[in-house]
Image (cartoon, grey):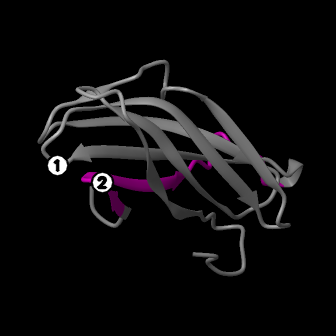
Amino acid sequence: MDDGYTQTTYGIAVTVRSFFLPEQSEPDAGKYVWAYRVRITNTGTGEAQLMLRTWEITDARGRVQRVHGPGVIGQQPVLKPGGRFEYTSGTPLDTPTGFMSGAYHMIWTQTGEPFDVVIPAFSLDSPHQGGRLH
């Protein structure tokens, strides 16, 4: 996935790329929608499972929405060493720009030890804004 934002924590690399969806957005009504594609790659030596996710979605006015829940897109994927998992999701905002960041709450499957993996901050850019936030 080119041109994405990437961060690696404990051997788990997360790459995120966002896409503005003009066909689902209604700028005149203050509705802007993005999709984001996430790739999670296990570059380490231990098997890990994604149990929970936490997102912070910040709009152009600085309002923050926190989303916390089990897995991603209804799944709690297990990542073997060298394995990866990709998914696409989306978010609406009532401003033409914003950004997202977060964490995946994972466990090492052999020990059950929990750990958090950083989801790098990435911008939600649309053609209806003045400049890039991130």
N-term mark: 2 or 1: 2
| Mark 2 residue crowding within 10 angstroms, few (<14) / some (14–19) / many (20+) | some
Q: How far across and down, in percent of the image, does residue 33 sit?
A: 66, 46
Disc marking residue 61: none
Structural distance between the alpha carbons of marks 2 and 1 = 7 Å
Q: Residue at x 71, y 72 (%)?
A: 129
- Residue 83 is inside the magenta segment: no
Q: Residue 11: x and y, percent?
A: 24, 53
Residue pushed farthest top?
A: 74
Q: Nearer the viewer, residue 7 or 109?
A: 109
Position of residue 32 in the picture relative to residue 110 (left or right): right
Give left or right: position of 25 versus 100.
right
Residue named by callout 1 = 44
**What residue sits 32% from the left and 45% below the top?**
39
Cβ atoms at labels 2 and 1 below 8 Å apart? yes
Seen at 82% across and 66% down, the residue is 62
* Residue 36 visible: yes
Span highlighted in magenta in the image:
7-27
SS for callout 1: loop
Depth check: give the residue in front, 110 or 41: 110
Q: Is residue 14 magenta?
A: yes
Can residue 25 be seen? Answer: no
Q: Residue at x 67, y 51 (%)?
A: 56
Q: How busy is the neighbourhood of tag 1: few (under 14 within 10 Å), some, or many (20 plus)?
A: some
Amino acid residing under circle 2: Tyr
The residue that mark 2 highlights is 10
- Residue 30's x, y, as percent? 85, 52
Left or right of 1, for residue 62 = right
- Which amino acid lies under the numbered mark 1 shown in the image of this protein? Gly
Residue 120 falls left or right of residue 14? right
